[in-house]
Image (cartoon, rainbow, N blue to C red):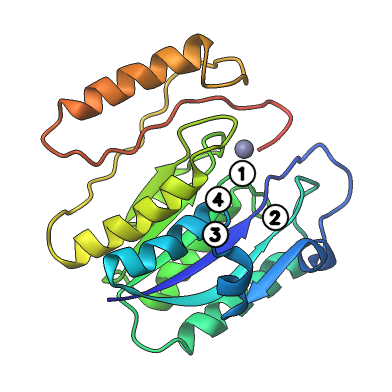
């Protein structure tokens, strides 16, 4: 089993003037190929979880590109296209792959692209086809679109704010990719928008805690134990 791994994450505040340019990504976090292993191994985040799962599950990971930067203004067209193109070129030269596992955050906007991850995933699907699993981890306050659901095989959101479980979600998407490949599971996706907004506070108390407890309880009673759980905690000033 050979899985590509990577990250393209941005939390965009569309009220910020100007654009987030490529150098913001390059100066904050830009790792290509094996550098992802040396920089992200043992880090308690999505990529650290993916990398730690490699040995445990006996899979081979092919590191592609990992880039992110601080939350900031809309991603410029040049930055978006350069990151996408770098990812795609590396994927095309990665050899045979059984899955593509990416940390995407989910709250990105680029110049002319309101919902960045949906467009990115559609473009990725156009490149790699519909047979290969594309599994993503997302921040729980990202904005899910129908396009993201359509073009990903499965999406796993952080459960907690503060995000103390991003490592677990990273490991989970590798596990799920392996189980899909073995024919043990076949993810089914459904996007349901609830007409509620809860305060953007910690998930360890208040309404978010109650909602998550209900979700975990519900999940434990289902025949299929893999469910994507998400609460809506959208901050009005960022998408
Ligand atoms: Zn977050």
First-in-chain label (1 vs 3): 3
User: What quarter of the picture does the N terminus occupy?
Assistant: bottom left
User: x%, y% of residue 193?
Assistant: 42, 27
Q: What SS does tag 2 mark?
A: loop
Q: Which residue is mark 1?
A: 107
Pointer 1 local density, CA inside 10 Å: few below 14, some 14–19, many at least 20: many
Please indicate whether residue 232 sits to the left or right of residue 130 in the image.
right
First-in-chain label (2 vs 3): 3
Q: CA distance from mark 1 to mark 2?
A: 10 Å
CB under 8 Å between callouts 3 and 4? no
Q: Which residue is mark 3?
A: 42
Q: Looking at the rendering, which quadrant does residue 178 occupy?
A: bottom left
Q: Quadrant of ligand 1?
A: top right
Residue visible at 51% across and 45% down in the picture: 166
User: Would you say residue 131 is visible in this rendering?
Assistant: yes
User: Would you say residue 146 is visible in this rendering?
Assistant: no
């Amino acid at each position: 089993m050979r899985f590509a791994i990577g990250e393209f994450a941005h939390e965009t505040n569309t009220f910020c003037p100007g654009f987030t340019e490529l150098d913001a990504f390059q100066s904050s976090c830009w790792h290509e190929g094996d550098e992802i292993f040396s920089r992200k191994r043992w880090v308690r985040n999505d990529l650290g979880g993916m990398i730690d799962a490699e040995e445990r599950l006996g899979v081979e990971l092919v590191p592609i590109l990992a880039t992110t930067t601080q939350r900031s203004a809309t991603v410029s067209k040049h930055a978006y296209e350069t990151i996408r193109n770098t990812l795609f070129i590396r994927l095309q030269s990665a050899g045979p792959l059984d899955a593509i596992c990416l940390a995407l955050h989910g709250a990105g906007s680029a110049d002319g692209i309101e919902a960045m991850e949906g467009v990115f995933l559609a473009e990725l699907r156009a490149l790699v086809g519909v047979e290969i699993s594309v599994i993503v981890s997302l921040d729980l306050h990202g904005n899910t679109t129908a396009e993201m659901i359509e073009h990903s095989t499965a999406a796993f959101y952080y459960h907690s704010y503060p995000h103390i479980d991003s490592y677990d979600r990273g490991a989970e998407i590798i596990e799920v990719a392996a189980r899909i490949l073995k024919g043990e599971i076949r993810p089914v996706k459904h996007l349901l928008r609830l007409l509620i907004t809860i305060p953007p506070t910690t998930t360890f108390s208040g309404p978010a805690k109650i909602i998550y407890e209900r979700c975990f309880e519900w999940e434990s009673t289902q025949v299929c134990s893999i469910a994507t759980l998400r609460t809506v905690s959208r901050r009005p000033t960022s998408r």
